[in-house]
Image (cartoon, grey):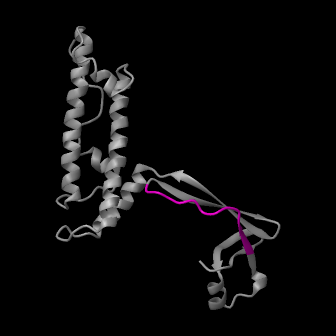
Amino acid sequence: MSKNVYAIVKNGEIVEYPVSDENVRMRSLPHEFLTPVIYEQDSPPASFNTRVVEHLRLEENAVHVKYSVEERSVGDMLSETHALMRSWHPRTPMSPALYLTVCRMRLELVNMYRARIDDVAKSMGYVNACDLASFLNSGIEKYAKSAKAIIDLRDAFWSAFYDYMERCEAGKTAYPARVSDIDTQLPALQAPVIDY
């Protein structure tokens, strides 16, 4: 970015930002149309699962800029990864950047689905899936059957998930654009019906 950054303000509203020195020269903008920009902090780094948001406010004839970091939704990250995967041809090696993106996306999906499996266990009255699974060898039949049911659900789910994602990542199946695209390919994550 150029040394000086401006904004164009009309009737107390920021109508254009950022405007660089180069942009001012190219468009022959008179300086009286320009409002200086003051960055109150350096922009924090973004990561795969976060984004940096600029907050602008007009104060004392200058535009003040602050930043915050927000979590990105799994859906947003998946949509972005889908777009990148569409530009890749399976007969060519993945670039390191695309490979890293795909790995990060898989990790985000694993974390999301792990939380959903834990939610199933919570709906059955347990702390999480690991807590429920720990009752597998319980002498109380109800607990042992519940543990077996969550283990069977978990195993079937992860087997289907990894099979589906491996096919997508190898280009054998279209990479999903939405979480619902994945959900339709996997066993439903709901409390199993258990015959006590």
**Spot occupied by residue 17 in the image (x, y as percentages of width and height):** 64, 73
* Residue depicted at 23% across the width and 44% down the height: 161
* Residue depicted at 20% across the width and 34% down the height: 155
**Spot occupied by residue 173 in the image (x, y as percentages of width and height):** 19, 58
Q: Which of the 4 image quadrants contains residue 143?
A: top left
* Residue depicted at 51% across the width and 57% down the height: 51
Q: Main secondary structure of the magenta part?
A: loop
In this view, the residue in front, 11 or 149, is 149
Is residue 42 magenta-colored? yes
Q: What quarter of the picture does the C terminus occupy?
A: top left
Q: What quarter of the picture does the N terminus occupy?
A: bottom right
Please give the range of residues in magenta.
36-48
Q: Is residue 172 left or right of residue 104?
A: left
**Spot occupied by residue 145 in the image (x, y as percentages of width and height):** 22, 16
Vertical relation: 57 (above or below) 4: above
Q: Which of the 4 image quadrants contains residue 135?
A: top left
Q: Is residue 193 left or right of residue 104?
A: left
- As drawn, the residue found furthest toward the right would be 60
**Spot occupied by residue 187 in the image (x, y as percentages of width and height):** 23, 37
Is residue 13 magenta-colored? no
